[in-house]
Amino acid sequence: MSESTPRVTAAYLERFQNDTVRILAKVVSLRGEKATVEAGGEVTLVLNRDSHLQVGHAVEIIGRVQSDLSVRVLMATDFGTNIDFTAADAVVDATHRYKEIFYER
């Protein structure tokens, strides 16, 4: 993926509609082709066939933000259960505070 993928939490989704983003989240529930994750708020994912998520695990999602603020998954990576989400949220905040370093807008 050559385009930039800004790191976001639920609070930033509205700013990135129709853009590709990166989200580190905890899987809360799975139901069919959708999943709910916690990323500074609830985010609905629209899964692809290659998405193999497990409830309670951290996952990094690269996906496109839809107009309803759900995220269509392009790629998902399981990060297991030992993730410091406080540190991850701090990285997201720094990314947007100094956005000129991390992505073009």
Image: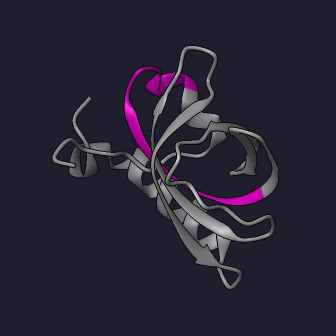
At x 22%, y 35%, the residue is: 104
On the rendered structure, is 101 left or right of 88? left
Magenta stretch: residue 21 in it?
Answer: yes
Question: How many numbered dots are placed on residues in this image?
Answer: 0
Q: Position of residue 37 (x, y in %)?
A: 73, 50
Q: Position of residue 28 (x, y in %)?
A: 82, 55
Image coloring type: one colour
Q: Nearer the viewer, residue 71 or 17?
A: 71
Q: Nearer the viewer, residue 17 or 100?
A: 17
Vertical order, 77 against 67 (above or below)? below
Q: Position of residue 52 (x, y in %)?
A: 60, 61
Residue at the extreme bottom: 82
Give the quadrant of residue 24: bottom right
Vertical order, 21 against 68 (above or below)? below
Q: Nearer the viewer, residue 102 or 73?
A: 73
On the rendered structure, is 94 left or right of 86? left
On the rendered structure, is 94 left or right of 102? right
Image quarter where the C terminus lies is top left
At x 50%, y 28%, the residue is: 65
Magenta residues, start to end: 14-27
Q: Position of residue 93 (x, y in %)?
A: 51, 53
Vertical order, 67 against 95 (above or below)? above
Give the quadrant of residue 69: top right
